């Protein structure tokens, strides 16, 4: 086999191994960044707030209906 072809093959193999490793490292660093981001915590807090608000409004609506029914029964 020609020495130049072997050298070119090794060069190409090394090039692509470096590209793959670089991509893997970038993906890992992006995953770490996402995990340490405050966005997930904020989303969770807002979800809890919205759940509490929804429960409060539902209870308030049920109480208003109950009062209306009681006042209608008295008349």
Image (cartoon, rainbow, N blue to C red):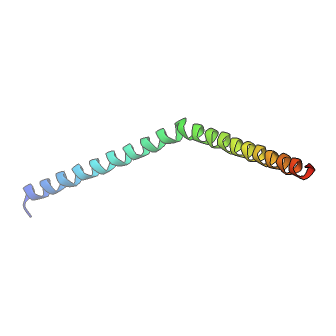
Report the side of 4 relative to 19 (left or right).
Answer: left
20 vs 57, nearest the viewer: 57
User: Residue 49 placed where, x, y %?
Assistant: 67, 39
Q: Residue at x 53, y 37 (%)?
A: 39
Report the side of 35 relative to 12 (left or right).
Answer: right
User: Residue 19 placed where, x, y %?
Assistant: 27, 48
Q: Residue at x 69, y 41 (%)?
A: 53
Q: Quadrant of the N terminus?
A: bottom left
Q: Which image quadrant is residue 46 in?
A: top right
User: Residue 73 placed where, x, y %?
Assistant: 90, 52
69 vs 15, nearest the viewer: 69
Report the side of 71 relative to 35 (left or right).
Answer: right
User: Residue 7 placed where, x, y %?
Assistant: 13, 53
Please determine whether, in this image, residue 53 is positioned above or below residue 6. above
Please determine whether, in this image, residue 66 is positioned above or below residue 46. below
Identity of the residue furthest to the bottom in this view: 1
4 vs 37, nearest the viewer: 37
Q: Residue at x 38, y 44 (%)?
A: 25
Q: Residue at x 88, y 47 (%)?
A: 71
Q: Which image quadrant is residue 47 in?
A: top right
Identity of the residue furthest to the right in this view: 74
Identity of the residue furthest to the front in this view: 75
């Amino acid at each position: 086999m020609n020495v130049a072809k072997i050298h070119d093959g090794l060069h190409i193999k090394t090039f692509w191994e470096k590209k793959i490793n670089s991509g893997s490292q970038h993906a890992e660093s992006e995953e770490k960044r996402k995990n340490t981001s405050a966005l997930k915590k904020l989303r969770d807090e807002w979800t809890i707030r919205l759940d509490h608000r929804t429960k409060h409004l539902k209870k308030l609506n049920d109480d208003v209906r109950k009062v209306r029914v009681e006042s209608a029964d008295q008349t």
